[in-house]
Structure formats: structure tokens, C-alpha cells
Image (spheres, rainbow, N blue to C red):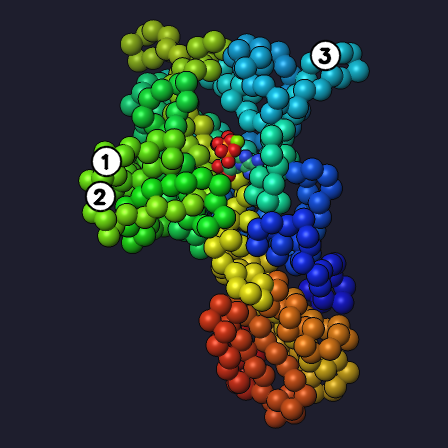
């Protein structure tokens, strides 16, 4: 992509309304545009990151055996009356009437709708286990929308829903999502810690929030230092092997970890002082087992191997891709801007032509641009006539993992400079070596 043809509305000044660094940097880097309270448009750079995040989420959901669907944003109140949640949900739910005065709502979540789909088609235990997910916009009329996309009113959510014959099956489904989440967040360059979370009025011991430690987090969390070094399951993990998956979950739930609501002072006191990590955290995912809470009132049942009908045992599993972008920036930035982990960076390489119009610079930039593209790299080529200082500042602000800097003196000698955004390390190399170093051929 040539920057001269791109839409990257960089802000020079710090936006006053932004209280935390991720919000500030997302606005300054031209990733998002606020449209109203807790509502944002995604501009080209932000949209690219959102897509990369969703791709990782999808790949890991699919790997764990979940199937992607897409449900509408607007739902009928009728369904929510069946589960009893229409009256319970309160002011967070945006209620709407259609032209026929029918009660509708903008979905804050989809348990009812997915249960309706399930009960319409699935009648036998032989069709289980089943896990359906979608990635769809949600609306919650939050009491205090703030921190940009971290807590907005309209936000993207991946929500998965599992259906099983009994508790044992549901627990295995829960475990698969648990392990899938560990992989998902690690692939984004994040260290997420599963913490025992409040199950609310439903009870049971099966709910975990996945928390990123960050000073700007909204919750107080407590965990054992061991979590910071636990190995994350690799791509070869066999999600069909319940025993293997259960082993991983055991390992990741043995050391102490809890959010404030679930904090147990006695258990905490037993953790050696040097191993205690008490910090602020950002919730990026939440998994939940709730058994028959929806299947029973909504009549979602299957014939079991015993020839009897059973209400299915369900769970739901959420990840917030839009909040994740803010969380990644909170965890990875410096005073000059964002530092994207490679897997979610909007482009792999920023190619900077320091002197557009200089024959050597233009020629070498064209050559590099073509070679990187041919190698499947996403390149943002700064071919604008801005001065070099401004180009460097922009490149640091938008945080692409690598910068390739082409200046007139080096270009005349066939050399370019490459800079790693994260380490700050710079190398001057002949063009062919620079290409090879960044995974392309001359
Ligand atoms: P919170 O306690 O932060 O309000 P929640 O418990 O209401 O979150 P869930 O219903 O579990 O959230 O939603 C699943 C995921 O959706 C969360 O883990 C989070 O990543 C994301 N999410 C929830 N609310 C918001 C919001 N207002 N803005 C952005 N992302 C959100
Ligand atoms: Mg909430």
C-alpha cells in the first residue's frame, strides 16, 4: 500500500478526551473515529488490526472444533421472554420497537437465539457435541463507557455456545475453549491469565475470566507468579483428546488466581510472599458453564442413549476483539507510539523513502516494494513528500514491526537501513541482504 493513496489521518496533538494510552494512541494513529458515546468507526489502519485479531480467533475456535455461524444484531424480545431475561437484563439492553410496535432489541449476547437454532434442528445425542460461534457486533448501554474501545457501547464479540448431553460432556467442551483461549491470546503476543470468576446467580465452579495484567486495568486481580512462566499449549495440541485437554486445564488452574470478587484471603495467605502478584487487569475473555439455564425454559432437549429426553448442558465463551486491540496497545507501546506484535500488526513493514524524487531512492524503494509484495509481506510504503523527521515519527507512532529506511546517500551506494520497532536495533545492509533479512528475495 502506498501511503500517498492511503487514508491515515494522524493527529499531531494528544486528544484531550483520551484518559489512557491505548485510547490516545489509537486516535493519534488514525485507527478509530469516535461517532458518539462509546461508539467508534474503524478507519483503514484499525480495521486491518481488527481483521488480523479476528483471523487468529477464528483459527483457534476452528481448531478446537467450534463452527462459525452469523446471527443478526437485532433480536426479537419474544425469545428473551422465553428465557426470562427480557425483564431481568435492565438498562444495559437497548430496546427498540419496529414499525408494527413489536418489541425488538439490539443483542448484548446470543444465548437465546442460538438455543432457538439448536432446538429447531438437533434431536439426538448422536449430533453432539456441538459448538457454534459467531463474531458479531454487540450493544450494551454501559453505565460508564470509557477508555475508547476498551469499554464501548457498540463492540465486537466472538461468542461461542456449546451443547452437550450431560455435565461431563459440557465440562470437556469448556476445557476445549479454555485451552483454545490460552493459544489465542498467546498468538497475539499477550500473556493472559485464567482467573476464577464469579458465576453470579447461576452457581457452580466453572467460570474463568482471561485477564491481561496492565496498570490501566479496571479490575483488581491476584495470582501466583508461576503463571508468568507456564508453557502455553502448542499447535499440535489434540483437541479430540479429552484427557490431554483436561491435563492442560489442571495445570493452568492449580496455582492461585482470582479476580477481586472471587478473592479468597485464606488461600492467598498460603501463597509465599515472593510469589504474590497483585495487580490491575483487563478482562479480554470470559468462559462460562451454565448447564440448563436456557435449555430448560426454552425446551432444548435431545434423545439420550438411554432412550430418554435430556435438556442439553450448555456453556458460553466470549472474547472481545475490539477491546483486545486496546489491551495489546496497553501492553506494548513506548513514548513514541504503538509497538505491534507481528501477528496482529496492520502491515509487516513500513518502507520509508526519505527523499521522494531522488532517482536512487525511488528506484530502490520500488524494487523493495515489489520484492516484499511478491514475498507476501504487507508493506506500507511512505512515498509522500513529507520531510524525513515526520515520516520517522509516523512510522514509530503506528508501530509496524520493521522499518526499511531508504535515504539518498545509502541508496547511491546500494544500501538501506532496517530498524526493528521493538528493540530499536538498526542495521545498514545492501538491498539484497535487507530483503533476505525480512524474508524476501531480491
Ligand atoms: P465487563 O465485566 O468488562 O463488563 P463482561 O463480563 O460484561 O465484561 P462478557 O459478557 O463476558 O463481558 O463479554 C465477553 C467479552 O466481551 C469480555 O471478556 C470483553 O472482552 C468483551 N466486552 C464486554 N463488554 C465490553 C465493552 N463494553 N466494550 C468492549 N468489549 C467488551
Ligand atoms: Mg459488562
x and y, in percent, of residue 296 in the image:
44, 10
Closest to the camera, between mark 2 and mark 3, is 2
Q: Which residue is mark 2?
A: 271
Which residue is drawn at the image coordinates 59% and 76% (left, top)? 404
Gap in Å between the C-alphas at discs 3 and 1? Answer: 51 Å
Gap in Å between the C-alphas at discs 1 and 2? Answer: 7 Å
Gap in Å between the C-alphas at discs 2 and 3? Answer: 55 Å
Which residue is drawn at the image coordinates 68% and 73% (left, top)? 391
x and y, in percent, of residue 149 in the image:
60, 44
**Any mark on residue 267, and which?**
1
In depth, the one of 20 and 178 nearer the eye is: 20
Which residue is drawn at the image coordinates 49% and 15% (left, top)? 119
In this rendering, would 402 be left or right of 77? left
Q: Are marks 1 and 2 in contact (CB under 8 Å)?
A: yes
Task: Tell me the quarter of the picture where residue 359 sits.
Answer: bottom right
Q: Earlier in the sequence, mark 3 or mark 1?
A: 3
Q: Secondary structure at mark 3?
A: loop
Amino acid at each position: 500500500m502506498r501511503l500517498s493513496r492511503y487514508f491515515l489521518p494522524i493527529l499531531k496533538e494528544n486528544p484531550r478526551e483520551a484518559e489512557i494510552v491505548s485510547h490516545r494512541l489509537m486516535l493519534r494513529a488514525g485507527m478509530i473515529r469516535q461517532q458518539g458515546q462509546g461508539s467508534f468507526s474503524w478507519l483503514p489502519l484499525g480495521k486491518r488490526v481488527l481483521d488480523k485479531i479476528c483471523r487468529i480467533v477464528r483459527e483457534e475456535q476452528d481448531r478446537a472444533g467450534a463452527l462459525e455461524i452469523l446471527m443478526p444484531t437485532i433480536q426479537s424480545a419474544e425469545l428473551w421472554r422465553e428465557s426470562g431475561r427480557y425483564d431481568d437484563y435492565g438498562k444495559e439492553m437497548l430496546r427498540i420497537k419496529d414499525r408494527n410496535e413489536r418489541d425488538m432489541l439490539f443483542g448484548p449476547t446470543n444465548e437465546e437465539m442460538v438455543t432457538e437454532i439448536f432446538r429447531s434442528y438437533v434431536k439426538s445425542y448422536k449430533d453432539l457435541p456441538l459448538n457454534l460461534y459467531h463474531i458479531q457486533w454487540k450493544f450494551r448501554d454501559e453505565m460508564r463507557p470509557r477508555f475508547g474501545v476498551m469499554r464501548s457501547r457498540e463492540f465486537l464479540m466472538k461468542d461461542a455456545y456449546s451443547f452437550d448431553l450431560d455435565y461431563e460432556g459440557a465440562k470437556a467442551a469448556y476445557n476445549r475453549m479454555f485451552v483454545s483461549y490460552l493459544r489465542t491470546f498467546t498468538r497475539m503476543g499477550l500473556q493472559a491469565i485464567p482467573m476464577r470468576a464469579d458465576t453470579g446467580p447461576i452457581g457452580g465452579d466453572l467460570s474463568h475470566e482471561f485477564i491481561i495484567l496492565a496498570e490501566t486495568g479496571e479490575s483488581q486481580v491476584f495470582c501466583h507468579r508461576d503463571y508468568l512462566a507456564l508453557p502455553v499449549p502448542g499447535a499440535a495440541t489434540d483437541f479430540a483428546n479429552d484427557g490431554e485437554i483436561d491435563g492442560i486445564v489442571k495445570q493452568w488452574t492449580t496455582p492461585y488466581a482470582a479476580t477481586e470478587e472471587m478473592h479468597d484471603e485464606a488461600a492467598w495467605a498460603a501463597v509465599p510472599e515472593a510469589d504474590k502478584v497483585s495487580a490491575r487487569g483487563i478482562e479480554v475473555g470470559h468462559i462460562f458453564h451454565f448447564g440448563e439455564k436456557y435449555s430448560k425454559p426454552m425446551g432444548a432437549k435431545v434423545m439420550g442413549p438411554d432412550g430418554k429426553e435430556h435438556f442439553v448442558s450448555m456453556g458460553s465463551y466470549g472474547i472481545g476483539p475490539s477491546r483486545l486491540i486496546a489491551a495489546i496497545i496497553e501492553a506494548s507501546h513506548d513514548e513514541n507510539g504503538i509497538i505491534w506484535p507481528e501477528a496482529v500488526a496492520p502491515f509487516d513493514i513500513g518502507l520509508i523513502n526519505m527523499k521522494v524524487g531522488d532517482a536512487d531512492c525511488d528506484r530502490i524503494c520500488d524494487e523493495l516494494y515489489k520484492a516484499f509484495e511478491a514475498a507476501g509481506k504487507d508493506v506500507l510504503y511512505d512515498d509522500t513528500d513529507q520531510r524525513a523527521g515526520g515520516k520517522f515519527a509516523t512510522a514509530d507512532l503506528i508501530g509496524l514491526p520493521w522499518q526499511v529506511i531508504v535515504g539518498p546517500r545509502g541508496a547511491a551506494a546500494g544500501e538501506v537501513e532496517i530498524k526493528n520497532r521493538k528493540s530499536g536495533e538498526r542495521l545498514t545492509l545492501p538491498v539484497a541482504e535487507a530483503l533476505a533479512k525480512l524474508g524476501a528475495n531480491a
